[in-house]
Amino acid sequence: MKQTRLFIATNAIAARRVSALLEDVFEEDGWPVSAFEVDEDNGIWSVSVYADTEHAQEAETRMTLALEAAGLPTGIGHEPLEDDDWVAKTLRALVPVRSGRFIVHGSHDRDVPRAHEHAMLIDAGLAFGTGHHGTTAGCLDMLGRCLKENSYHRALDLGTGSGVLAIAVARSLPARILATDIDPVAVDVARQNCRLNGVASRIRCETAPGFSHRAFREEGPFDLVIANILAGPLQALARDLAANCAPGATVILSGLLPHQRARIVATYRLHGLDFIKAHIRDNWLVLVLRKRG
């Protein structure tokens, strides 16, 4: 039976509300609802309902009424679909991402990893980090280089998103890892991905804005910190991040643009973290710092 995709473009926060709302609206119809980030640079998400074409007009009306009642945007787009497996079609667009010995792949590419690679199974969903964005891929690049030079025992993935970077550490080391995010949805996704990748016993996932959560005291101090967020939060968190690092700790920072390098390096130097190296991938900057002592 032919299907029509009804979709709405929105931001990440609204996407979660829209997705949950539409799942309730169309639960009895059995029409799938999906949410994917379509423009990571600008934070644009697409939430879609896949309705039988003969009922598409009715579905759009119900969708509009539900969105209006919830005070959400109602600009709905249409895309007629061919007789194809739309799930497979969507997933095929997410090709595996390789970075050194790391490979991030979806469930549709389970046979892609090679024997020597550290494979991470991450499907696209309501959390940042499938490996396709330059910040995530750049962090994997630098993590791989740092692991050639050092061994780590207590790691922190700050702003974990999908959990991909924490899983990468777990794939490489017998370390204890704390993965935190301010978004509870992301933390739930990270927990699911940790279980899916068989590393849940070594990764503690917590919803934690800032560093006040007891998990930081219980799991730290850390000798490896990866923070893939944005320049503003990285600057604001510099003092607390440094305080949770063990002497000699390696810190990998990303979510940065090249012109922000000097400001971030100077801020972290004030708190005892010295610049070691920099890396650019897809025009995104990754910094590696080391805690003095």
Image (cartoon, rainbow, N blue to C red):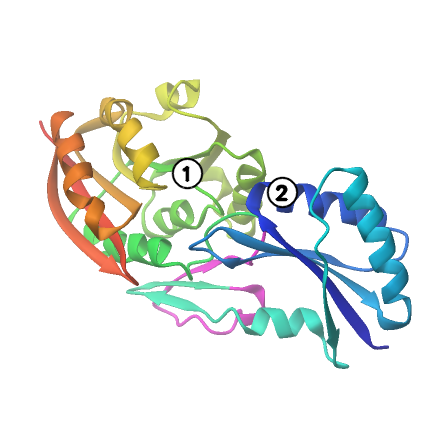
Residue that carries the numbered disc 2 in the rendered image:
14
User: Can residue 123 be found in the magenta stretch?
Assistant: yes
56 and 226: which is toward the camera: 56
Identity of the amino acid at label 1? Gly
Q: Residues within 10 Å of mark 1 (few under 14, many from 20)?
A: many
Tell me the element at label 1.
Answer: loop
290 and 117: which is toward the camera: 290
| Left or right: 272 as drawn, with respect to 170 | left
Residue 171 in percent (x, y) is at 38, 52
> Residue 103 shows which numbered tag?
none
Q: Between marks 2 and 1, how big is the CA–CA gap?
A: 19 Å
Residue 208 in percent (x, y) is at 46, 26
| Left or right: 63 as drawn, with respect to 165 | right
Is residue 107 placed above or below 206 in the rendered structure?
below
Q: Is residue 134 visible?
A: yes
Is residue 238 placed above or below 26 in the rendered structure?
above
Is residue 265 placed above or below 23 in the rendered structure?
above
Q: Residue at x 74, y 76 (%)?
A: 81
Is residue 236 placed above or below 190 in the rendered structure?
above
Q: Residue at x 63, y 47 (%)?
A: 15
Q: Quadrant of the N terminus?
A: bottom right
User: Can residue 225 be found in the magenta stretch?
Assistant: no
| Left or right: 22 as drawn, with respect to 15 | right
Q: Residue at x 77, y 81 (%)?
A: 83
Residue 70 in percent (x, y) is at 76, 37
Image quarter of residue 261: top left
Residue that carries the numbered disc 1 in the rendered image:
159
Q: Which residues make up the magenta segment?
A: 106-125
Q: Is residue 26 visible?
A: no
